[in-house]
Amino acid sequence: MAKTDFKTVSEYIATFSKEDQVALGQIRKTIQKAAPQAEEVILPDPRL
């Protein structure tokens, strides 16, 4: 079974391929720039 108890967004992103990590990092930076006061959170998947 895949790991689902991530503590940080960085920990979650690290599970993807290097190519996907780059893309996710760019998306993350864009969101942080647009919403600098936003808090990153990891939510459990309700389907599990």
Image (tube, rainbow, N blue to C red):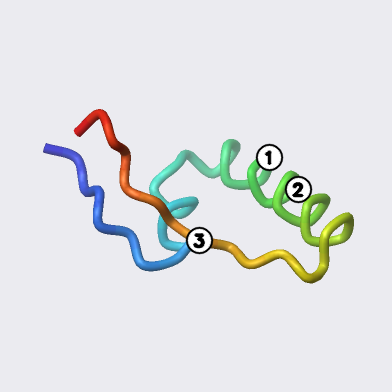
Of the pair 15 and 30, the residue shown nearer to us: 30
Q: Residue at x 49, y 51 (%)?
A: 13
Q: Residue at x 78, y 52 (%)?
A: 31
Give the mark, 3 or 2, whose residue is nearer the N terminus.
2
In space, the residues marked 3 and 2 are separated at their CA atoms by 17 Å
Q: Which mark is residue 23?
A: 1
Q: Residue furthest left?
A: 1
- The type of residue carrying mark 3 is Val
Disc 3 crowd, CA 10 A, few/some/many (<14, 14-19, 20+): few
Q: Which mark is residue 41?
A: 3
In the rendered view of the protein, which quadrant contains the C terminus? Answer: top left
In space, the residues marked 3 and 1 are separated at their CA atoms by 19 Å
Where disc 2 sits, the SS reads helix
Taking 30 as reference, is 21 left or right? left
Image spot of residue 8 (x, y percent) = 44, 66
- The type of residue carrying mark 1 is Ala
Taking 48 as reference, is 42 left or right? right
Residue assigned mark 2: 26
Tag 1 and tag 2, C-beta contact below 8 Å: yes
Relative to 48, is 3 above or below? below
Image spot of residue 38 (x, y percent) = 72, 64
Relative to 37, is 35 above or below? above
> Which label sits in the foreground, 3 or 2?
3
Q: Residue at x 50, y 61 (%)?
A: 41
Instruction: Name which quarter of the figure residue 42 lies in.
Output: bottom left
In the rendered view of the protein, which quadrant contains the N terminus? Answer: top left
Where disc 3 sits, the SS reads loop
